[in-house]
Amino acid sequence: MRPTVGSRLDITVSLVGDTVAAVEILPRVQPPVGRLFAGKPAVSLLHALPRFFSLCAVAHQVAFTSAIEAARGEETRFVTKAHRITQVVAERLTELLRGLFIRHLALDTNGSAAMPALIKDISVLVGRVGYHCGSDRREVTERVAAALAELRISNDDGTLMPGSALALRIAALEASALEPKWTQQAFLSAVDDCKIIDRLLGRDARFDHCLDLPGGIPETGPWARQMLRDRLSLGRSGPAERLKARIAEIVQLFSWLKAGAHAETAEEGVVKSYSLRRGCGAAAVECARGRLYHAVELDRHGQIARFEFLAPTEWNFHARGPLARNLQGAVLSAKQHQQDAVRAMIASFDPCVAFTHNIVDARHA
């Protein structure tokens, strides 16, 4: 979700023997979006958001629009809220599928053939859900179900067929050379919104790299949502578990869209807005990689006085965040596979930008 062209994550893992002794995640520089649009009409930034944020553009537009309405004290109609929830869920589903394809199915013949058509059909389905019914929508949902079947994913409960590309991928991840050390986990949810918004609006230039919440830096994304939704007990927390959570969420979201995408049955907190004071509002949106925040302040003429945003990647790739916790103290066996194992762990958190990773021997650093 970072708009800076060419920005990336640089991650260095230091080993002592086969154990990860330290994890360094270099921060990235925030683009001055708020400064660029200060004193300008809100609509100017709304139209620019897809250029700044090529990933999850809909989520950013919904978050910004909802925050602006809250700042103005405007009441959003139920039908508008329902439409925004549907669009956010559809984009989340598309992004989860795209990530599944790029990171896990790119070399699979069936996956390569099925995925583009699946993403296209979901886009068509979303344009019709809630507004049209009949044979056309049934045909689209049937094609999506067929594409999931081609990927050998049950569209009832997400069960993978034995021997399928995804089942083999999960088995490979479970046999990874990296064994994470058990660690305390924290998960981001709508319950945290007000605390985060307060910090977002009260932050200084260093806030981007000094996030903090009671209980530690939380994880956000499909696995965190699954842990909160299903109230699962903590166990393994490696790439295999995060891939399983992604597949389960894909099936869940498709089932919701297929059933008519009723806002009343959507998960809690997909889109939330907060009117803070006159001319100041914020919003949170649950997108593919996790919870996204926008906060705005308007001047007395209704123009943008301040704009702040906080993307999910800032939590998951915080210097003391979930990735660092999962790598710190982990044991890396099979030296020839260490690079692949570390890369798989990083990729399982689905960063919104490219990343590099380097493994060094701390004893010779």
Image: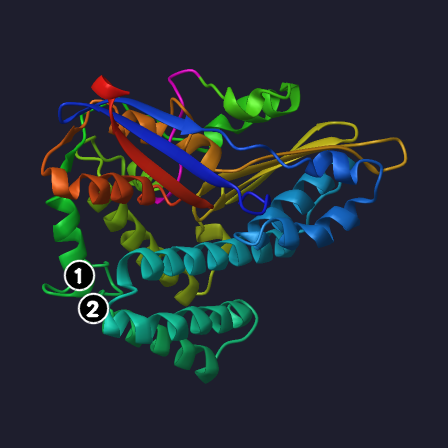
Query: What amino acid type is highlighted by mark number 2?
Result: Arg
In this view, 55 is above or below 206 = below
**Which numbered marker is on residue 100?**
none
Q: Residue furthest front?
A: 364
SS for dot 2: loop
* Residue under pointer 2: 152
Q: Quadrant of the C terminus?
A: top left
Question: Residue furthest toward the right?
Answer: 301
**Structural crowding at the residue carrying mark 1, measured as other residues with C-alpha within 10 Å and reported as few (<14), some (14–19) or many (≥20):** many
Residue 1 locus on image (x, y percent):
53, 45
Q: Amino acid at mark 1?
A: Leu
The magenta segment is 214-222
Q: Position of residue 166 (x, y in %)?
A: 20, 60
Q: Around disc 2, counting alpha carbons within 10 Å, would you say few (fewer than 14), some (14 to 19), or many (20 or more)?
A: many
Q: Residue at x 27, y 35 (%)?
A: 231
Furthest residue in direction top, as rendered: 214
Left or right of residue 137, residue 31 in this image: right
Q: Quadrant of residue 127?
A: bottom right
Q: In the depicted view, which residue is nearer to us: 315 or 285?
A: 315
x%, y% of residue 354?
44, 46
Q: Which mark is residue 160?
A: 1
Relative depth, front residue between 109 and 57: 109
Residue pictured at 13% horizontal, 42% vertical: 336
Tags 1 and 2 touching, CB below 8 Å = yes
Q: Is residue 218 magenta?
A: yes
